[in-house]
Image (tube, rainbow, N blue to C red):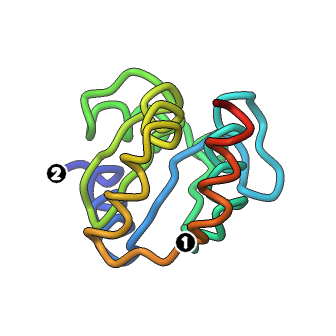
Amino acid sequence: MTDAATQIKDTITANDVVLYMKGTKSMPQCGFSSRVAGVLNYMGVDFADVNVLADDGLRQGIKDFSDWPTIPQLYVKGEFVGGCDIITEMTLSGELDTLFDENGVTYDKDAANKIREANG
């Protein structure tokens, strides 16, 4: 395993929810990262954010690790969930709630419902 792959494996193992993104959860640096971080923040999810812009090896390493070409990338309990479009669809369909429920991830169900109401 490369250094980046080892670092990624350690991070997704040590944290229930991890978002590999451009920027940070408090200061996203691309619209797609902002959307996913915004959903997680609004829903009150405790998640680790990893800024891929701070490390070129990690930026490419996460794409290789997941075999997914774009960032952001969301991991729950060590499993790759998807990027911005998938997380958006899962949020609107309620699948993200189910995933969090099944994995014991705490989130604000009312906030999740408000997102769906606002986008329904």
Provide residue 93's location: percent of width, then percent of height.
44, 38
Query: What residue does disc 2 label?
Result: 1
Helix, strand, or loop for circle 1?
loop
Residue closest to the eye, 64 or 76: 76
Provide residue 88's location: percent of width, then percent of height.
53, 34
| Residue that lies at the very extreme toward the right in this rendered image | 27
Tell me: 62 left or right of 79. Answer: right
Among the 4 quarters of the image, the one containing residue 76: bottom left
Q: Residue at x 55, y 68 (%)?
A: 47
Picture disc at residue 107: 1
Circle 1 packing at 10 Å, graded few (<14), some (14-19), many (20+), is some
Provide residue 96's location: percent of width, then percent of height.
41, 51
Residue closest to the eye, 120 or 11: 120
- Given this view, does label 2 or label 1 mark the residue nearer the observer? 1
Type of the residue with mark 2: Met
Instruction: Tell me: residue 5, above or below residue 84.
Output: below
Type of the residue with mark 1: Tyr
Helix, strand, or loop for circle 2?
loop
Tell me: 34 left or right of 67. Answer: right
